[in-house]
Amino acid sequence: MHELSKQEFQIGLTMSGAISAGAYTAGVVDFLIEALEAWEKAREANTDGTVPNHRVGIKVMSGASAGAITAAIGAIALVDEAKAGSFTHDGFVYRYTLPKLYEAWVVKPTLDAGDPKIQDFLSLDDIEARPPETEDFSRTSRTPYPAKNDPLPVVSLLNSRLLDDIAAGAISVGEVRGPRPYVSATLHVYLTLSNLRGVPWSLRFDGGDYHMISHGDRAHFVLQGAGAWATSSDFADNDTSRAELDLATIPDPANRNGWKDYAVCALGSSAFPVGLAPRLIDAPLPQDYAGRRYPNSDIAGLNNLAPQWPPAVVKETPFWFTCADGGIIDNDPFEYARFTLKKKATDQRILFDLHKADRAVVMISPFPEPKPIRNEGEPAMDIVSLFRSLMPSLIDQARFKPSELALAVDPDHGSRYLIGPRRVVDGKPQRYGIASGLLGGFGGFVARAFRDHDYQLGRRNCQKFLMTAFAVPADHPIVTSWPQQLDKTPLEALPEASDRADAISYCLVPLYGSAKETVALPPWPQIAQADLDRLMERIGARFDRIAPLLVQQNVRGVLGLLLGFVLLPGVRNLPGLIKDKALSFTRLAILSDLVRRDQIRGWELPGDIGVDPDDARLVIGELLDPAYDERNVEGIRKAAAPMSQMLDAAAIERVLDRLKTARGKPYQVWEAPWRDKDGGRLYTLVSRRPDIVSRALIQLGVGFFKPTVDAPGI
């Protein structure tokens, strides 16, 4: 083994919230560990100095929502002795290095497992009986457990017990492997939380006090046993609000409560409101918040920050709060990774000069796309429109980080990197990089094929990142410290590593062994119509069970009686009532996204469509939008504009006219014989056109049958 250089490069991994697209993040982490492990083995076997001898290691991981799950399970996967695996499907080889990550993100989390004996998000056990306390992951170990006769509320639309099962499997490790030399001996893990109870603060001003409440919280764990690399952190090591766990003890049942609390905090960070269940988390007062370190240069070095808890709250033993998705307030917690990497917590920034940087934050973000502002005139000046826009606006503002803007505009900044989905076919970047992007990020749960694709794409994108962007200039101390006999040519980063055509950069993590084999681009996944039909049956079955319970638990009086009546078994299946409308809306929402993204078979377009197929699918997707019965051209154009600037009114009309002739196809277009108020033509799919009686009543002007259409002249 050749002697290790003194040159070290510390990295902090930040994993954004992504719901089901966490499969992509997990794939990135999976390949990064494979690359670091293969390099370590090559260095151990090297005796002549022909392998780079510097160290690149992981010091901290921070995550929100799905990123928190990946960070938490990823840390455990580092000590799990289970071996890497692979399988072949339709000629493509799917690989994984960390079985725990793969199982947690690809194998288990699904809406329809296809087998009633296998738990999934649409199973019904969460509303049938409360689990034993030892199997309950709804709360941390010191939070009071419900009494035997307490009611069992519906806490989420989906069955979050599946996540409990995944968490239990994650902290169940049979055999522990030795520490990895490229992971810090004290691995810091930060998981963002949205504390719905709140933390009270008081600021003293001349003349009086100013009071505030904070809801942005976090859990800080210091894990030992994953690595053997000695590091320190002025910021993280001096944080009094942290929990220390030794991964070597994870198989010991005596340590179950500590690891269960660790898992519950990760689940709390991923508790997407309404869709997934919130979690209850306890924190000892006042010590858990007194002396806590905050990732802000002005206060990072202070140890005397303490909330002003009401006396009655301080006496609570334990103090506990309801936790929702950490991504609501902090979806990209790179500041925790950045401050952990700083030499001094009060430094304005970590060393960022490209020619000297020895540490960097690597952010993995499955959804790094620009967020378009609303169209002119949106939201409308009515109460409902304003209310619907309020929550997304508050979340966007909470996630805005002006402190990072100064670094973002610095062209020589070298301490932040981003890995995001990039799918290139025949040299052309595809409009949709990940398969889990439909349904606002929940779409990956529709089919395992979607998650398998994204996991492999994450591996592929990470490999490309290490070969291109993650590099340093030739005069960097790491490069100049390499042995003289080392051939640097194979270590040159590909041209994408620099904007300067004449600059030569060298990869910080060289690829050896299995990591050097090209990770192939996985085929774009699709489901069949039968898969969607079966999924809708499962959704309907869960609706039948939870809708009456939701009404019973939350609606009283005459309205409760009325809703209870229309949800009776013999009534709720009648066409046009609540269930029919809810399932129709859900089906169209799923189908419209599947069609837009070319993820359902049977919707293949004709070759003479006249526009880019992705643009044509945008038009069809808009005709499937459940918010409208019929669309006008300008409404389609405006809705599609964020995805395509090529779809002008003329192009949309060409697509619509061409698809009117697609007889027998599911995307055949029907033009209504009536017009909007401005005389604009209205369209929908043949499958969605009104029946003959409804058409006659619409033409007679019967208001009850009036279709929902785009506002005229939008």
Image: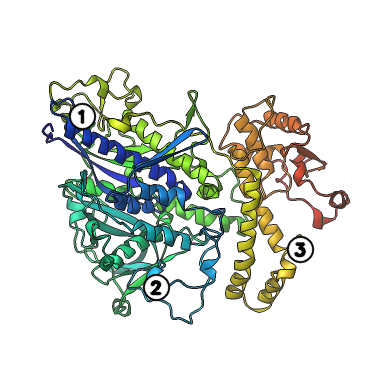
Q: Is residue 556 left or right of residue 12?
A: right
**Quadrant the N terminus occupies:** top left
Local secondary structure at mark 3: loop
Q: Earlier in the sequence, mark 2 or mark 3?
A: 2
**Quadrant the C terminus occupies:** top right
- Checking the image for residue 355, the label placed there is 1
**Disc 2 crowd, CA 10 A, few/some/many (<14, 14-19, 20+):** few
- Checking the image for residue 102, the label placed there is none
Observer-side mark, 3 or 1, equals 3
Observer-side mark, 2 or 3, equals 2
- Residue type for callout 1: His
Local secondary structure at mark 1: loop
Q: Is residue 94 above or below residue 703?
A: above
Determine if residue 421 is in view.
Answer: no
Residue at left 43%, top 51%?
397
- Checking the image for residue 133, the label placed there is 2
Local secondary structure at mark 2: helix
The one of 132 and 403 positioned closer to us in this rendering? 132
Image-quadrant location for residue 163: bottom left
State the CA–CA distance, disc 2 to disc 3.
41 Å
Q: Is residue 34 left or right of residue 327?
A: left
Furthest-top residue in this view: 502
Q: Is residue 142 left or right of residue 370?
A: left
Q: Earlier in the sequence, mark 1 or mark 2?
A: 2
Q: Is residue 253 left or right of residue 705?
A: left
- Horizontal and vertical percent position of residue 240: 20, 62
- Label 3: which residue? 574
Q: In this view, does 612 lie above or below 186?
A: above
Observer-side mark, 1 or 2, equals 2
